[in-house]
Amino acid sequence: MLIDIEYNLDEIPGVDPRDDCYSDEAAFISDLRLIDASLRDRGDARLADAKLKDL
């Protein structure tokens, strides 16, 4: 799926998919933890424990 997204972004003039990359893995992990907490706060721990945990 990520390959499909990158391919589609390559087709949009002026959009470079690499411009929005995380600076390091700590920044990525921080966002994943924020998403995890948000899912749990809204009662969707099952999704956080399944799909998100795989990341």
Image (cartoon, rainbow, N blue to C red):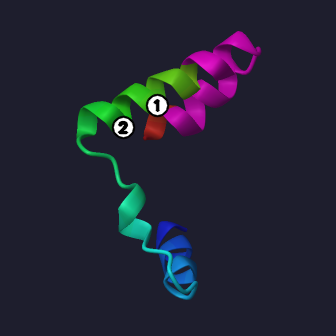
Expressed as whole percent of the image width and height from the top left, the position of residue 17 reads 43, 69
Label annotation for residue 28: 2
Hey, which residue is sitting farthest right in the picture? Answer: 43
Expressed as whole percent of the image width and height from the top left, the position of residue 4 reads 55, 77
Kind of residue at badge 2: Phe
Identify whether 14 is placed above or below 32.
Answer: below
Q: Report which residue position mark 1 lands on.
A: 32
Decide whether residue 4 is among the magenta residues.
no
Q: Predominant secondary structure in magenta?
A: helix
Residue at the image position 36 percent from the left and 37 percent from the top? 28
Residue at the image position 38 percent from the left and 26 percent from the top? 30
Residue at the image position 33 percent from the left and 47 percent from the top? 22
Which image quadrant: the N terminus?
Answer: bottom right
Assess whether mark 2 and mark 1 are in contact (beta carbons under 8 angstroms).
yes
Hey, which residue is sitting farthest top in the picture? Answer: 41
Kind of residue at badge 1: Leu
Hey, which residue is sitting farthest front in the picture? Answer: 14
Determine the image quadrant of residue 49. top right
Expressed as whole percent of the image width and height from the top left, the position of residue 36 reads 55, 23
Q: Nearer the viewer, residue 19 or 49?
A: 19
Determine the image quadrant of residue 19. bottom left
Q: Is residue 31 left or right of residue 4?
A: left
Q: Alpha-carbon distance for marks 1 and 2?
A: 6 Å
Decide whether residue 47 is among the magenta residues.
yes
Label annotation for residue 13: none
Identify whether 43 is placed above or below 49.
Answer: above
Q: Which residues are magenta?
A: 37-52
Q: Nearer the viewer, residue 49 or 26?
A: 26
Residue at the image position 56 percent from the left and 27 percent from the top? 35
Q: Is residue 38 left or right of residue 30?
A: right
